[in-house]
Image (cartoon, coloured by chain):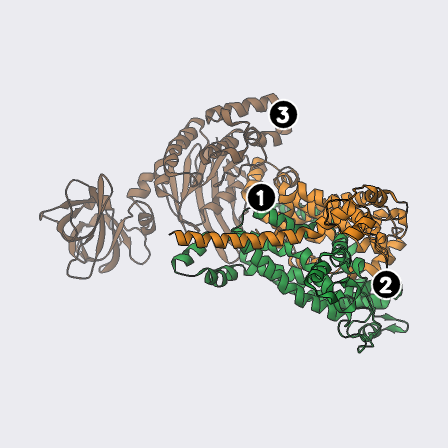
Chain colours: A brown, B orange, C green
Amino acid sequence: MARVLLENIVKRFGRVVAVDHVNVEVRDKEFMILLGPSGCGKTTTLRIVAGLEFPDEGRVYIDDRDVTDLEPKDRDVAMVFQNYALYPHMTVYQNIAFPLMIRRKKLGLTKADIKKKVLEVAKMLKIEDLLDRKPGQLSGGQQQRVALARTLVRRPKVWLMDEPLSNLDALLRLEMRAELKRLQKTLGITTIYVTHDQAEALSMADRIAVMNKGRIIQVGSPDDVYLRPSHVFVGTFIGSPPMNTIKCVIAKSNNEYILQCSGFQRKIPGGELAGVRDQQEILLGIRPEFIDVYKEPVPGGIKAKILVVEPQGSEVILNVDINPGGEETLLKIKTKYTAKYRTGETIYIKPDWTKISIFDYKTGKSLA
Amino acid sequence: MGRRRGKVFLKYLAINIIVWTIAILWTLPFIGVAMVSVKPFKEVVINGWWTLTGHYTLKNFIDAWSNPIYGVGRGYTNSFIIAIPSTIIPLFIAALAAYVFSRFSFPLKTWLFITLLVIMSMPQQMSVVPLFFMLDRMGLYDQLSGLILVHSAWGLAWITFFLKNFFDTLPKEVEEAARVDGAGDFHIFFRLVLPMSLPAIASVSAIQFTWVWSDFFYALVFLASPEKYVVTLQVANMRGQYFVDWGLLSAGAIFTMLVPLLVYALLQKYYVRGMVGWTIKG
Amino acid sequence: MFRGLWRRSGKKRRGRSKKAIIITFLLPELILLITFVLTPIVGTFVISFQTENGYGPDNYYKVITETSPDKALVLPKNIESLRPPPWGALIHNIVWVLIHLPLVVFLGLALAYLLHEVKGSSIVKTIIFLGMVIPMIVGGLLIRFMYDGTLGVVPLLFKTLGINSLAKTWTNYPQTALISLILGSVWLWTGFSLTVYSAAFESLPKSYIEAAKIDGASGLQIFFKIVIPLLKHATIVVVVMTMLWDLKIFDIVYVSTLGGPGGSSNVMALVMYLYFARALDYGRSAATAVILALITLIPGAWFIKQVMKSGKEKR
């Protein structure tokens, strides 16, 4: 059992605040992914858990032990680095055995014990044939497996990974995603994983912590962050293409709310929007895949003109203007590639109004 | 098309001729000395060294090696006794310091680093007068051990600078990985950083060894008794003021440069990389 | 409340172990440097100002105004009998830089550029680099050999060309001694600039040159407008190191001419040695050393500035 708790972590580099009052709890056996753009503080947060950086404020707990001031070696964590950080002068076997060799006396291991453990983990990662080679002789994918084996050989309490898949080619990356997730679940190791790739995060995580500018914006399951973003940043960072945002004004009368957007108006049920002022400026968020497209006018359909057609194989992304003639209001739509679409064509679109998000225009926070 | 190819070929030919002419000119002194060394000097004076005919002899080499007054044979041992520790000692000490310069920040770091750079540009002459008195007082004047200490200390600056630059290029993640894996500072330095630095260590060893072997000035100033002379002193003494026996001197010169040339031949890659690397980064 | 206390002590503990490492690793170096390098350097300063009656700049005055041919720094006496050279040793050092430096830069750069298109270029490089490998004392002997009236290549060449005035042992005549050593030092030192420039060429991204070609630049334009500016850093290195080498030159001169004849190939380092070992005048010897060190600090300071700048860029 291992639970990681970050309490009010602050880390500054000179004047830059890299991590800004981060609070997050990683549950036992959970696969937690820190997701965010580069420079958002996710790697620094991970390194604070590893003990490679020490926070200026706040505490780090593993289980209920305060490890804030402990050196990495006393924390029982293991970390996979982006460039694998294999020891170039050691063989694969020596690399994997290294964490055990160092603790040999403390753990009371014999050479035979170590060998057994190394072979076991090598088998698990299918690298038994590579044990005599040096890292320089391995392919990227093989190096990756060695790096994983090295971290798993001593069954750490917490498994840390810093963009471990980003140096692999696209196909191998997809393959490794599934394998990493499987490994994590079979071994049941509490895992913190850093990535900037939202697809990777959505496909692997139990929960995702979305970070921006040193802060945690939202923590939740992949469904949560995808369908119910708490902040416009989450909506626009996750998803490909990202969520459409349209600036609108809310007119409030009695218990009715009317969204006034360029190109269309829409009445929405009021119960969901507590605390909204009359004439408040908001951002309406609509995911490109939650919009239906019609060639002919339909009730409740919004007229739109196709500007660009981007075929994606089985799907197509349409870039449309929903306010033709007026101020250009752009929207991306992802839809099945069933009909032929032409640039300049007029179509009618109908968002799925149950899956929209509404954010405050000024703060970006979700209002729904 | 054909004309273009012809022009390109002519240019190629011209460049090759120029470059190889220069290269051959460059080797002439070496060839000349080699020829003179294996011929009786009288014959060389009359016929020139560029003829392949005439007698060949090893007499010059035997005399240059074992002559009781100016033979370089004795100097050889002394040169090795000085050059080997004068390579190992500063290499080890500077490696420790360079690691600290590369990985830690501490007060006065910038100033210490600048001091190293200043030392690197200082002429040896700047230390000689006080060192002479100091060594004398410490009983190290005219001692091989005194020369070893001086060479070691004066090698520190450039070796520290060189190794610091090299350590800077080593991926920090490897050390961090070891830290997370449970290794301490000493372990990381001796078991990871040093083994990973073998190329740089080879460069430093090759160059520092050659430099100490080749040193003339410190030996001239700090060694007094002929039985302590190093090989560079011996070969310089072979040259008479007015009459120069080039046969003997050539053999002596060949003996003297033989060891550096061997080091160069064995470690050429590291030697050249070191020469370029301690001045250029990366 | 206790948490705060723990925290501070934890930080301290980390700091202490870090401090221990820094001190342990730095200490041997500092001890050796202070004893055998820094103290002597300061000592030389002090001695250079010591005179019979207390401290003063007398040594400097005497050293600079000295006119005996074997020790003069600026100008020796009886200038009329020997048309220059000889000048003083300091002037010789400067002449050395003025002739040696451009030749070395040009030769190194040109050869590195040409060697791009030559088969067996690594052999040529190895040959030219040999001058860097052999002991300078041997280099000096080989230079002396090149100019030897009976055996040397240079006099022989002029003999075949019919120029008998130059078909003699160059190092034995005041008019030719200095220039012969300077040219000989080009032979020794070109390997350095060639190697630095070759390495710089290799690290030049080919795409720059290819882009320039597509943009329509000629070979010469590419060389002057693209290649040379990109080699700025290498040039700085070559210039600084060559200047330092020229100013410190000693072995070559000692073994081939001992500064002669008549001081016509004398250099600073040799003057310093002659004061020290022949005249046993330690004050003037130290003063000469300080002057030499101050002059080497001109390229030295430039070098330090470059190093510190590139260090900052990296950070």
Q: Name the residue under label 3.
A: A108
At 66% from the left and 68% from the top, the residue drawn is C98
Q: Mark 2 points at which residue?
A: C276
Q: Disc 1 is attached to a residue of which chain?
A: A
| Rendered location of residue A147, percent (x, y) | 50, 34
Marks 2 and 3, how far apart in space? 66 Å
Q: Which amino acid does label 3 sit on?
A: Gly
- For label 1, the crowd category at 10 Å Cα-Cα, with few meaning under 14, some 14 to 19 and many 20 or more, is many
Q: Disc 3 is attached to a residue of which chain?
A: A
Say if residue C310 shows up in the picture.
no
Q: What residue type is labelled 1?
A: Asp
| Rendered location of residue B18, percent (x, y) | 57, 55
| Rendered location of residue B117, percent (x, y) | 67, 58
Return the residue nearer the eye: B99 or A218.
Answer: B99
At 32% from the left and 41% from the top, the residue drawn is A224
Marks 1 and 2, how far apart in space? 59 Å
